Image (cartoon, helix red, strand yellow):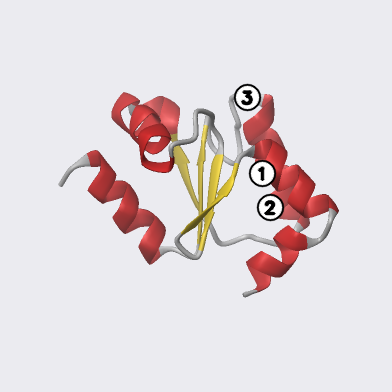
Amino acid sequence: MTTSESIEQLISSNPVVLYMKGTPDQPQCGFSANAIKILNACGVTNFVAVDVLSDPEIRQGIKDFSNWPTIPQLYVNGEFVGGSDIMTEMYQNGELLKLLEK
């Protein structure tokens, strides 16, 4: 299975997937910490977190897959939502909570 295929399989079989630096308990960058904070504020407790620092192929593969250059990356119901800045904006205007409730 290629890196792209494994990414596709993971995001299509889990409602919420966050590719991040570090883990939810120990984020390794401020943007990933912010993403976790936002998901927690939305009441999301059941999500898959993928530490891109533990696998260089996944780290580059997710950027290629989404055509998005930065980490973290949030996927909801198989769709790419965005990174920390987009998550923040969507959280502030209520869009993210609505998306997560679907």
Q: Which secondary structure lies at badge 1?
A: helix
Determine the residue positioned at 78% across, 46% down. Answer: 89
Residue 34 versus residue 96 in the image, above or below: above
Q: Position of residue 11 (x, y in %)?
A: 40, 56
- Asked if disc 2 and disc 1 are in contact, CB closer than 8 Å, the reply is yes
- Classify mark 1: residues with Cα within 10 Å, few (<14), some (14-19) or many (20+): many
In the rendered view, does 38 fall on the left or right side of 15? right
Q: Quadrant of residue 24?
A: top right
In the rendered view, does 95 fall on the left or right side of 3? right
- Going from N to C along the chain, the mark reached first, 3 or 2, is 3
Q: What's the residue type where badge 1 is placed?
A: Ile
- Going from N to C along the chain, the mark reached first, 3 or 1, is 3
Q: What's the residue type where badge 2 is placed?
A: Leu
Residue closest to the far front? 67
* Mark pair 3, 2: CA separation: 16 Å
Q: Position of residue 22 (x, y in %)?
A: 52, 31
Q: Position of residue 83 (x, y in %)?
A: 61, 39
Q: What's the residue type where badge 3 is placed?
A: Cys
Residue 62 versus residue 16 in the image, above or below: above
- Classify mark 2: residues with Cα within 10 Å, few (<14), some (14-19) or many (20+): many
Q: Nearer the viewer, residue 60 or 56?
A: 60
State the residue position of label 1.
36
Residue closest to the far bottom? 102
State the residue position of label 3.
29
State the residue position of label 2.
39
Residue 3 versus residue 98 in the image, above or below: above
